Image (spheres, grey):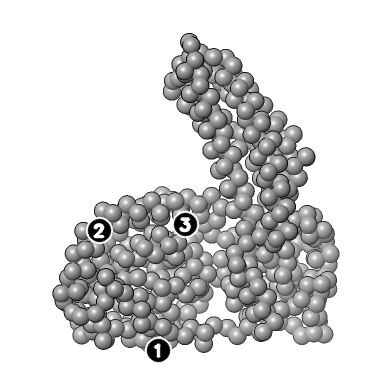
């Protein structure tokens, strides 16, 4: 089987201009850093799995000693104990980066949580008359091995974190929006940068040098707010901090209108503010309170669950649909000369351009990899086989490979071609905030598609409606919502009147 690799278009012209200094800084940060949020999630998963494994091994040993036994009650305890201790440690802040770094002060709290967990499990097994394999020492052994695990694991983790921090691999990359005196006060208030995972790489401000100097407290001014959007994407920025007084209401709103399309956490500094909100309204960098305005969607545990869901379901689907792949490939080859697969440049997560795979549905010499001409009803460029596979969406099946590669998700906003347009206007010019749909990975299917918004986009209204559903999906996302969309997709394909 062959793939059409002739698609090559230049998307640089559609990107905002970024000054040379800012571009060099962004390119030096183009590699992904490990976020503290991801690290905390990974540590919780590893600790829970390790404790469950310890319990399983001890139960196996007990079951093979004279008078020992293994029952469902022990299986329950093996699951309950890790969950209880993880929740306890988390409630005491034991998975914050400062706690993961500080071995000596954090370890006693962890061991206290583990003691209380074993005590709760022991009390529960007594009052509920749950057997523990005929050996009372089982829980004692569980405690001792668990405590030893925490002592060793946390020591190793602290050493790794310090090494990753020195190498610049573990940090939350941040920029400040707004310069001058207020930014200087903010940077000073952050305190010792080694005591937090946040590292500020630059300042972006529309004001001139007289009100916003080129450097504030050692942090360079890298450009304007318009340049920030491109910089944040290239540098994989995690956090935007708006350093403007809360009283500058109109200016803050104008900034947020430009910045909310980015897949980052957006915070506004409450330093020196006389307003007082509930504690849950704030997050902190050192002693500085920040108002939480926007959070990156589908992060932490959610992103891990979604990725596991994607890999498992996509792998199963590729196996089950292999006869359909084979039949489609043969039909395309017999119907018209040319490659079986077609590759097109489309927007992916964080506005990055990716290659999306499809079955070829057009005559090879009439193919349109840059999507300059919209496919319409009765389009002569579409082959006989192409009309069928487009209506039935079989042409989209190779995108399961994109899912396994991590470029797409099974469910999400559909990836649009880079040059997609309506009435001679690019879609990001037609819809205000269009790029906000790229705050999550695009999907093979999506909320808009199962609501009938698929196929030809020949009017501004159609792309407006698609984007509305995409943004609604991002706001409402949950694993069950993804499952619902996936289950409904085959039924919604029956109505293919807009797919040509």
The residue wearing badge 1 is: 424
Point out the frontmost of discs 3 and 2. 2
Q: Is residue 256 visible?
A: no
Mark 1, other Cα within 10 Å: few <14 / some 14–19 / many ≥20: few
State the separation of the CA atoms marked 1 and 3. Answer: 32 Å
Rendered image: mark on residue 322: 2
Frontmost residue, 274 versus 410: 410
- Location of residue 392 with respect to 99 vertically, above or below: below
Q: Position of residue 376 (x, y in %)?
A: 26, 82
Q: Position of residue 379 (x, y in %)?
A: 22, 83
- Location of residue 148 with respect to 289 vertically, above or below: above
Q: Residue furthest top?
A: 67
Q: Are marks 1 and 3 in contact (CB under 8 Å)?
A: no
If you read the primary sequence from the N terminus, does the residue marked by circle 2 or circle 1 appear first? 2
If you read the primary sequence from the N terminus, does the residue marked by circle 3 or circle 2 appear first? 2
- Location of residue 15 with respect to 111 vertically, above or below: below
Element under disc 1: loop
The residue wearing badge 3 is: 476
Element under disc 3: helix
Residue at position x 64%, y 70% in the image: 29
């Amino acid at each position: 089987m062959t793939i059409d690799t002739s698609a090559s278009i230049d998307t640089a012209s559609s990107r905002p201009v970024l000054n040379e200094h800012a571009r060099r800084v962004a390119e030096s940060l183009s590699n992904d850093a490990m976020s503290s949020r991801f690290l905390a999630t990974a540590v919780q998963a590893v600790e829970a799995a390790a404790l469950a494994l310890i319990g399983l091994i001890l139960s196996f040993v007990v079951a093979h000693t004279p008078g020992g036994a293994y029952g469902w009650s022990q299986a329950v305890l093996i699951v309950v104990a890790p969950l209880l201790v993880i929740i306890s440690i988390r409630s005491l802040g034991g998975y914050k980066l400062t706690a993961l770094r500080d071995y000596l002060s954090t370890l006693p709290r962890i061991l206290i949580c583990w003691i209380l967990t074993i005590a709760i499990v022991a009390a529960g097994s007594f009052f509920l008359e749950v057997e523990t394999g005929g050996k009372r020492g089982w829980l004692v052994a569980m405690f001792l091995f668990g405590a030893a695990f925490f002592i060793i694991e946390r020591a190793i983790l602290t050493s790794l974190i310090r090494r990753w921090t020195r190498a610049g691999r573990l940090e939350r990359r941040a920029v400040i929006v707004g310069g001058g005196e207020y930014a200087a006060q903010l940077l000073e208030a952050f305190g010792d940068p080694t005591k937090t995972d946040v590292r500020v790489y630059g300042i972006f401000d529309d004001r001139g040098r007289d009100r916003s100097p080129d450097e504030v407290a050692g942090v360079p001014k890298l450009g304007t707010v318009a340049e920030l959007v491109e910089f944040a994407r290239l540098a994989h920025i995690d956090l935007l901090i708006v350093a403007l007084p809360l009283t500058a209401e109109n200016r803050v709103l104008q900034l947020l209108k430009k910045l909310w399309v980015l897949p980052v956490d957006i915070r506004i500094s409450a330093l020196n503010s006389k307003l007082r909100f509930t504690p849950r309204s704030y997050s902190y960098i050192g002693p500085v309170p920040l108002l939480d305005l926007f959070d990156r969607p589908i992060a932490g545990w959610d992103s891990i669950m979604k990725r596991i869901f994607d890999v498992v379901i996509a792998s199963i689907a590729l196996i089950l649909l292999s006869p359909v792949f084979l039949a489609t490939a043969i039909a395309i080859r017999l119907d018209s000369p040319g490659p079986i697969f077609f590759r097109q440049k489309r927007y992916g997560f964080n506005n990055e351009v990716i290659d999306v795979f499809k079955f070829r549905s057009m005559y090879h010499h009439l193919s349109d990899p840059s999507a300059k001409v919209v496919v319409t009803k009765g389009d002569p460029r579409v082959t006989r086989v192409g009309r069928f596979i487009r209506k039935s969406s079989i042409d989209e099946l190779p995108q399961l490979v994109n899912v396994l590669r991590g470029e797409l998700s099974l469910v999400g906003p559909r990836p649009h071609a880079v040059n997609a347009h309506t009435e001679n206007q690019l879609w990001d010019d037609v819809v205000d905030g269009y790029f906000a749909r790229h705050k999550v990975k695009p999907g093979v299917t999506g909320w808009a598609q199962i609501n009938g918004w698929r196929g030809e986009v020949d009017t501004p209204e159609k792309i407006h409606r698609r984007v509305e559903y995409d943004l609604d999906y991002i706001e409402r996302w949950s694993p069950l919502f993804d499952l619902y969309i996936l289950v409904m997709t085959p039924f919604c394909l029956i109505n293919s009147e807009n797919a040509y």
